[in-house]
Each structure stands twice: as structure tokens, then as C-alpha cells.
Amino acid sequence: MIEVKNLSKFYGHVRAVDNISFTVAEGDVVGFLGPNGAGKTTTIRILTCYQPATSGSATVAGHDVFKESLKVRTEVGYLPENVPLYPEMRTREYLRFRGKLRGLDRPEREAAIARVTERCWLGDVIDRPIGQLSKGYRQRIGLADALLHNPRVLILDEPTVGLDPAQIRETRALIRELANEHTVMLSSHNLAEVEATCRKLVIINRGAIVAAGTPDELRQRITGGSKLIAELRGPNEQVAAGIRELNGVSDVHTEAREGWTRVTITSAKDLRESIYTMSTQKGWPLRELRREVATLEDFFVKIVAAAREETVTPKV
Ligand SMILES: Nc1ncnc2c1ncn2[C@@H]1O[C@H](COP(=O)(O)OP(=O)(O)O)[C@@H](O)[C@H]1O
Ligand SMILES: [Mg+2]
């Protein structure tokens, strides 16, 4: 549904997007995750035909975003980072105005407004001036606007930024519902957000894609499996040798502690049962056996910290 190939965007000498490629299949809900300044908005603005790329190609619903922008726009509903709304307009007036811009005739427009009002839970505020509404409602009006022409693809740029926790929960629930009917790509700088709403993640940092896949796949790939910590009472070298022989072990570190051997094992597999069996077979008592699954959060926090350091440390 979305295909991006070797896309780059320079703002003068600033390389905002650096040769990225990814695809979003029909029906997917993909989170485009990255720290501030990673290049998310730039990519989204290219995909929604709001700005050109420097090089590369992209199609949305089979249409080239550079050559067939009108077709792309009919297939895409776009919620920008900051929704430009007219505070003096009432919700219904605003949606009518947007529907006219979309070229919907009166009956189509009224039907579409009824549909998105229900879809985005706007019934209570449909006749109120937008300027009086909370940020949560305004965000939903932006979503309603993006849905007026019933697009197949929804592209949402940081849809919950600036909302309070209750509004965030509502917006996430709404996105999950919309994901049943539309292909969705949403950007966020918040891992919890994409984990709560998306089935796939594309992680971008400094304009480049650093990882992509389902959260489970990424956890596996990024962290190289889990860590296992065990303490056995046995001779250090024999314990280490015994563990190295187990299937699936990629790294073993041992430490002698007053007759006990503390082992830290990196492995793609859960080896707890094998280690217990070894302990009973060899007669090495076991006093600790613990699995630490490295989280995606650890990985993402590292990326964010590195990005932050770069922005505060001037390059020489
Ligand atoms: N109009 C612009 N002119 C110059 N630089 C820009 C412009 N827009 C964004 N940038 C720069 O491009 C990089 C990516 O920005 P952006 O796509 O907004 O990131 P994100 O949405 O992930 O926070 C940043 O370094 C940003 O400062
Ligand atoms: Mg942005």
C-alpha cells in the first residue's frame, strides 16, 4: 500500500532523510518511530505530497507521489503534526468547508459528515465553535477531516502529542478502530504509543532506518536474544565448559564467588530447563536462575540518548 525506495531529502546541507526504504502492506498498522528530528515529518510530508523529495521514489496505493499527487490525495487521509483549524468555525461548518474543498457534492458531504462524526465521537461538539474545544476534540476533528473522503490509507503524524492521558487513551482506541478499516501509518517519538496501537514498527534515527519488523521480531533482532543469570556451586571452569556445550548459547561470562560460580549467558533460547537439568546431573546446587529479556525500550532509549548527545555536543 505504501512503498518507499531509496528516498532522501536534503534541506540545503541538512540531510533530513537518508536513503530510506520500507513498505506498508494493505491492512497493516505501522508505527514510524524515532526521536525528535529523526525525519518522520519530512517522510510523511513527502508521502502525502506536501513536499518533494531530493531523490528516490515512493508510491501510495499504487500511485507515484511525485507524478500522481491528485490520485494519492484521494487515497490518503493525512493528519498533520499541528492540525490547522479555524477557531471561529463550528465543527460542522468546518467539516462542510473541508468537504467542499474535497469536491464532495452536498448529499455526499452531509453523509460523509454524519459518518465521520459518529466515527470520531464528535456528536457532542458538532455545533460548537472549534476555539472552545479541548485539544483532544480538535485532534479528533483533524481525524474526522482526514476521513471525510473515506481514504484507504491514513497517515497520522504524532497523533497524540500534547494530549492528556485520558485523551491519549481515547485517541489510541479510535486509531485501533480505524485500523480495522484502513491501512494506517502513524509516527511517534514514544515507544509505548506505537506498541499500544501498531502491529509493525519502522524505527528511524537521524534520517536512516535502523530497524523494522513486528515488536517481537525487533526485540529478538536488536537485543540478540535474552540474558540468563545463574549461580551454581561448582568449579568455575567446569561450569563454564558445561554451559558452552548447551545448544543455542552465544556468549558465556563467569565469575567466581566464594565457591559459587555466577554465569551470565546470552542466548536466543530460554535455557532455564537445561541449566536446571545440568545442576541436578552434575550435582552442582543452584541458588539463582533468572531470565532477563532485553526490552525494545532499552534499545530505543539508547537511540534517543545518542541523538540527544549529538544535538548538544558541537562537532569539531
Ligand atoms: N523546513 C526545514 N528546513 C530545514 N531543516 C528542516 C526543515 N524541516 C525539518 N528540518 C530538519 O530535518 C530534520 C528532520 O526533521 P523532521 O522530519 O521534522 O523530524 P521529526 O518529525 O522526526 O521530528 C531535523 O534535523 C530538522 O531540523
Ligand atoms: Mg515531526
Image (cartoon, helix red, strand yellow):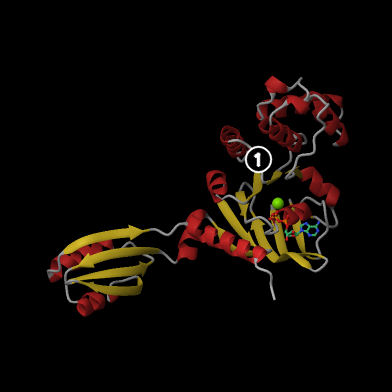
Q: Position of residue 65 (x, y in %)?
A: 80, 55
Residue closer to the observer: 302 or 48: 302
Q: Is 274 drawn above or below residue 97 in the view shown?
A: below
Count the labels in the image: 1
Q: Position of residue 156 (x, y in %)?
A: 69, 45
Q: Is residue 242 left or right of residue 215?
A: left
The residue that label 1 is drawn on is 162
SS under mark 1: loop
- The part of the image, by quadrant, that contains residue 256 is bottom left
Q: Is residue 27 left or right of residue 279?
A: right
Q: Position of residue 117 (x, y in %)?
A: 71, 26
Q: Which residue does the image show at 53% across and 44% down from the upper left?
A: 196
Q: Is 259 drawn above or below residue 97 in the view shown?
A: below
- The part of the image, by quadrant, that contains residue 183 is top right
Disc 1 C-beta below 8 A from ligand 2: no
Amino acid found under the numbered disc labelled 1:
Gly
For the C terminus, the quadrant is bottom right
- The part of the image, by quadrant, that contains residue 240 is bottom left
Residue closer to the observer: 154 or 285: 285
Q: Residues within 10 Å of mark 1 (few under 14, many from 20)?
A: few
Residue closer to the observer: 1 or 8: 8
Q: Position of residue 94 (x, y in %)?
A: 82, 29
Q: Is residue 5 left or right of residue 304?
A: right
Q: Report whether residue 108 is seen.
A: no
Q: Report whether residue 158 is seen.
A: yes
Residue closer to the observer: 140 or 69: 140
